[in-house]
Image (tube, rainbow, N blue to C red):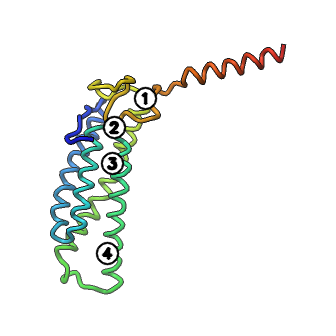
Amino acid sequence: MCMPFETVPPPNEKSQNLVSKLKYICLLQLILALLEIFTNPFTGLNELFAVFILYQAYSTISYCSLIVYVFFCSMNLMQYLLGFGNLWQNHQMVKDVVFPFVVAVIASIFYPIAIYLAFLAYREFKAIAMSGAPAGGVYTNATGNAGGGLSQPFNRYNNRPSKIANSHNHEVVSKHSQVKE
């Protein structure tokens, strides 16, 4: 995909609310990434990558990207919880690591909220994709499906079986009905 993505407007009010909440989460995670760059540059770059994934998810209404985002946030949350356990186990004083500890506390509060909102958005975006309705009617691909995050393989036939499967089933039913007669 090329940057910037072709944005897909949310098709209903619930998805619009979720997209606006995801935009706030994205902004807060960008601030968190900038703070983390000062404590651990690798973790800060990882956060910037998560910001990119979240931006891609809400701009294209892609529920698959939200799965990746939830995975990223879960792994980062686990990393911070293990860090707290390490501090507690080794009886280290917080005064030795004040700024990294404050950033870790902020991140540990942020991640569960971000995971919860991303999961709500995942449910809504997947429901939109499964319904087969175009997302906002912005653009469609050659098969008539909405582009961006909603051009998923299962939505290719708008959740209807193909004609080949129907003709095969009809032949099978016809043969069984002839046998019974």
Q: Nearer the viewer, mark 2 or mark 1?
A: 2
Q: Kindly identify the residue that appears in the image at 19 percent across and 83 percent down.
A: 96
Q: Mark 2 vs mark 3: which is more N-terminal?
A: 3
Q: Residue 168: horizontal and vertical position, in percent? A: 65, 22
Q: Nearer the viewer, mark 2 or mark 3?
A: 2
Q: Which residue is mark 4?
A: 84
Q: Kindly identify the residue that appears in the image at 51 percent across and 24 percent down.
A: 160
Q: On screen, 34 above or below 163?
A: below
Q: Kindly identify the residue that appears in the image at 33 percent across and 37 percent down.
A: 149
Q: Mark 2 vs mark 1: which is more N-terminal?
A: 1
Between the residue at mark 2 and the residue at mark 1, the CA separation in whole angstroms equals 14 Å
Q: Residues within 10 Å of mark 2 (few under 14, many from 20)?
A: many
Q: Which residue is mark 3?
A: 118
Quadrant of the drawing holding the C terminus: top right
Between the residue at mark 1 and the residue at mark 4, the CA separation in whole angstroms equals 43 Å
Q: On screen, 153 above or below 29?
A: above
Q: Which residue is mark 1?
A: 131
Q: Nearer the viewer, mark 2 or mark 4?
A: 2
Q: Mark 3 vs mark 1: which is more N-terminal?
A: 3
Between the residue at mark 2 and the residue at mark 3, the CA separation in whole angstroms equals 15 Å
The reply to whether dot 3 and dot 1 touch (C-beta < 8 Å) is no
Helix, strand or loop status at disc 4 = helix
Q: Residues within 10 Å of mark 1 (few under 14, many from 20)?
A: few
The reply to whether dot 2 and dot 1 touch (C-beta < 8 Å) is no
Q: Which residue is mark 2?
A: 149
Q: What's under tag 3, amino acid-wise?
A: Ala
Helix, strand or loop status at disc 3 = helix
Between the residue at mark 2 and the residue at mark 4, the CA separation in whole angstroms equals 37 Å
- Determine which quarter of the picture holds residue 75: bottom left
Q: Residues within 10 Å of mark 4 (few under 14, many from 20)?
A: some
Q: On screen, 24 above or below 143?
A: below
Q: What's under tag 4, amino acid-wise?
A: Phe
